[in-house]
Amino acid sequence: MVLPVVSASSPAATAAVMLRVQSVGKRFGGLAALTDVSFDVHEGELVGLVGPNGAGKSTLFNAIAGVFPPSEGRILLEDRDITGLPSHRLARQGLARTFQLVTLFSELSVLDNAVQALHRHRAGRLVSGLLQTRSYREESARWRERAREALALLSLEGLAEQPASSLPLGQAKLLAVAIALATEPRLLLLDEPAAGLSHEESSRMMDLISDRVRGRCSVVLVEHNMRIVRRYCDRAVVLQFGRKIFDGAPAEMVNERAVVDAYLGTGEGA
Amino acid sequence: MRPVHQSPAPWLLVVLLALPFVASNYWLHVAIVVLMNITYTVALCAVLRMGYLSLGHAGFIALGAYTSVVCSVRFGLSPWFGMVAAAALCGVVAWGLGALTLRLRGIYFSLAVFAFGEIVVAIARAFDWLGGPSGIANVPRPSFFGIKLDTHFSFYWLAMALAVLLVTFFARLEQTRFGATLLTLKTEPGERLAESVGVNTAAHKAACFAMSCAAVGAMGAVHSMYLLFVNPQVFSFLMSTDLVIYAMIGGTTGFWGPVLGAGALTALGEQLFSVGYWKTLVYALILMGVILVVPGGLSAVSALWKREMTPRGGR
């Protein structure tokens, strides 16, 4: 790929590019929800995608996550063009996501939720399954162990046998992250992981993401709480009216006139 | 995933093996009809558990029956071949129909497959080559190592063997990782989450629907051999709804739900057959009672019971 580096201000600019969003636009009928948005996410980076309501954060998130294809532009994951791929294929390419409304396999136990998340590793071998061969059962036991490890990453191992539907919101949101992480992604998209949580729960969530998730994959975090972005993210990408108005260190966001006008001018959120 | 359940098979198998030596022809007839309906219902339940209410399974039973009859009567092929062809054709057609319609949820899917069932029956009625309204008679029965299965005693073994094979298949399927994944597709959020962790949900659903329909197609072929005829009336929409009623009353989960529901009601239905409309009335009343008292079906009663009896937290 011979392409100019778009965001030179990033501290991780020397690391390999994990995600490259290239001139992405999205129109819904006559409405331009996104216009010419470009940015990179580097390996191991935690990038906050920020903007006031209606700025296009969710549209961009959904376009990257394969909910719908962008109208223009390309999206590359580690130099592979993933534009318009359906989400199950994105998962196999190493892209995982959470949902803004907490989404779990609500009829399964916490452990079985994580087991299901291992799908891309453990699918297949239906005939052995029907015969319940020894190797099939041993393999299933191994996946359960691996699922436990995924739960332990977010300190959920003590809840493994609980029904997922019984978890309070804070733990349910942690489980949602554990499910995404269990797919062993290269890039994780988190849709407002701290929204709706109490102050303590929100700090705990962000500490876990920062300490335990960041080392495993790159993370893009949709967030409108500026304090969270400033405290935890390596870099912030700010959208307004579907256009990128800032891309750089979170601490510099507040010095940027456009961001202050667009977003902070109306009060600094939380 | 859950541990493999204790199989109820051993003693049930003994009963099934002993039955023909003690039962009269009438009771063998009841047993054959019960076994066929149990198989249909168990196969239907695989689709119901996935969150899809199929009102078109009778259409696939008809497709299987007609395929096998056309093979044996029109082309003079072996009934065994007809049975395999029925399963294959039903599986392929269901895969295609499923790929188109399983995207639709709720009533839209139900109506789409209902329409398919009506189309199958309408085509059979429209073409003389397929027997028209009066159907095709003199359907040959298969032979097994030179023994023609033309008695209740001998035919029972065919119906029983196929029923055991298919019921075992679906019971085992539920225990596989594939089966566990199918269960997560029941709700729309579950399906979205499954998709996000890499499950090709459309292919999973189509495969499950195809397996279910291939199974009822194979049994439909045996059904036509048992009746010695096919006609459009046998596989009407009411048969589809009967299967759903069996599943609702028995419960869609586990081994016993569909087996009990279909078994009890079919046996009861055979008893009520001579008085015609009583069957419909009794089914309807039982269905209303079950829905109001135990919405999960009869198998939910035992699940409730088990939950009461098992100490919490243990496995």
Image (tube, coloured by chain):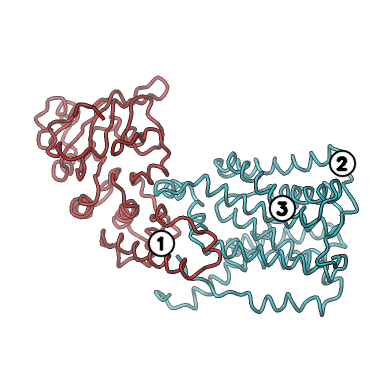
Chain colours: A red, B cyan
Q: Position of residue B218 (x, y in %)?
A: 72, 55
Tell me the tag on residue A112.
1
Chain designation of label 3:
B
Whole-Å distance between the Cαs marked 1 and 3? Answer: 34 Å
Seen in the picture, residue A245 relative to B186 is either above or below; the reply is above
Residue indicated by mark 2? B132
Q: CA distance from mark 2 to mark 3?
A: 20 Å
Residue placed at 26% from the left, 58% from the top? A154
Q: Is residue B264 above or below residue B93?
A: below
Gap in Å between the C-alphas at discs 2 and 1? 52 Å
Check the image and report above or below for A67 versus B80: above
Counting residues from the N terminus, which is met first, the one under dot 2 or under dot 3? 2
Which image quarter holds the C terminus of chain A?
top left
Closer-to-camera residue (A183/B187): A183
Q: Tell me residue A143's x, y (percent).
A: 38, 63
Q: Are marks 1 and 3 in contact (CB under 8 Å)?
A: no
Q: Quadrant of residue B219?
A: bottom right
Specify whether residue A202 is in view: no
Q: Secondary structure at mark 3?
A: helix
Both marks 2 and 1 on one chain: no
Residue A107 picture location, percent across and down: 45, 59
Between A203 and A123, the residue placed more toward the observer is A123
Residue B240 in view in this figure: yes
Left or right, residue B36 beside residue B177 = right
Q: Which residue is mark 3?
A: B217
Which circle marks residue B148 in the picture? none
State which mark lies toward you, 2 or 3.
Answer: 3
- Of B253 and A148, nearer the camera is A148
Quick one: SS at disc 2? helix
Please report the residue visible at 53 percent of the width from the left and 71 percent of the height from the top: B304
> Residue B44 at what x, y percent from top left?
64, 55
Q: Is residue A138 left or right of residue A4?
A: right
